[in-house]
């Protein structure tokens, strides 16, 4: 295995997620320290949380809000959000963002109330 990986996000297949659609780079190997997702948020994303993953969002396009443990905060391009494990969250509005899950994304670590 080499010491690097390269992903072309616009060529990755989009996967359905609680927020909309995600193109996930570097999520396949369990030993990766992080993954990187290009996410298209839909207006009615689903509240969820993670027990182990931390997520960092960077808004690229659109305006809306993010709900964090029941509190809403405005989002616009270049807004960054740090989401710790256990924080119930969802994005509201039509947005395009980069999501960096740490450690790499694990579908078994998505929880819903």
Image: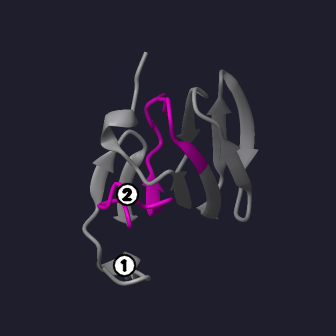
The residue under label 1 is 10
Neighbour class for label 1 at 10 Å: few (<14), some, many (≥20)?
A: few
> Which residue occupies 34% across, 45% down?
17
Query: Is label 1 in contact with label 2 (beta carbons under 8 Å)?
Result: no
Kindly report the distance in space between the C-alpha atoms of the residues bearing marks 1 and 2: 11 Å
The residue range painted magenta reads 26-55
SS at badge 1: helix
Q: Which residue is at a point 47% across and 29% down the rendered structure image?
A: 48
Residue under the point 36% across and 64% down: 23
The numbered mark at residue 103 is none
- Residue corresponding to mark 2: 22
Is 43 one of the magenta-colored residues?
yes
Q: Residue 34 at what x, y percent from top left?
A: 50, 59
Residue 89 drawn in magenta: no
**On the rendered image, what quadrant is the N terminus found in?**
bottom left
Of residue 92 and residue 23, the one placed in the foreground of this image is: 23
Q: Position of residue 25 (x, y in %)?
A: 38, 68
> Residue 28's image quarter?
bottom left
* Overall secondary structure of the magenta section: loop
Residue at coordinates 40% horizontally, 80% vertically from top-left?
A: 5
**Residue 53: x, y in percent?**
51, 41
Is 56 left, or right, of 1 in this rendering? right
Q: Earlier in the sequence, mark 1 or mark 2?
A: 1
């Amino acid at each position: 295995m080499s010491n690097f990986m390269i992903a072309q996000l616009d060529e990755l297949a989009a996967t359905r997620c609680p927020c909309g659609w995600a193109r996930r780079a570097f999520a396949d190997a369990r030993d990766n320290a992080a993954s990187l997702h290009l996410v298209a948020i839909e207006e009615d994303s689903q509240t969820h949380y993670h027990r182990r993953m931390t997520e960092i969002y960077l808004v690229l396009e659109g305006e809306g809000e993010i709900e964090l443990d029941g509190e809403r905060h405005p989002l616009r391009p270049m807004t960054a959000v740090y989401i710790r494990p256990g924080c119930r969250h969802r994005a509201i509005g039509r947005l395009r963002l980069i999501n960096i899950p740490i450690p790499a994304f694990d579908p078994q670590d998505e929880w819903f109330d």
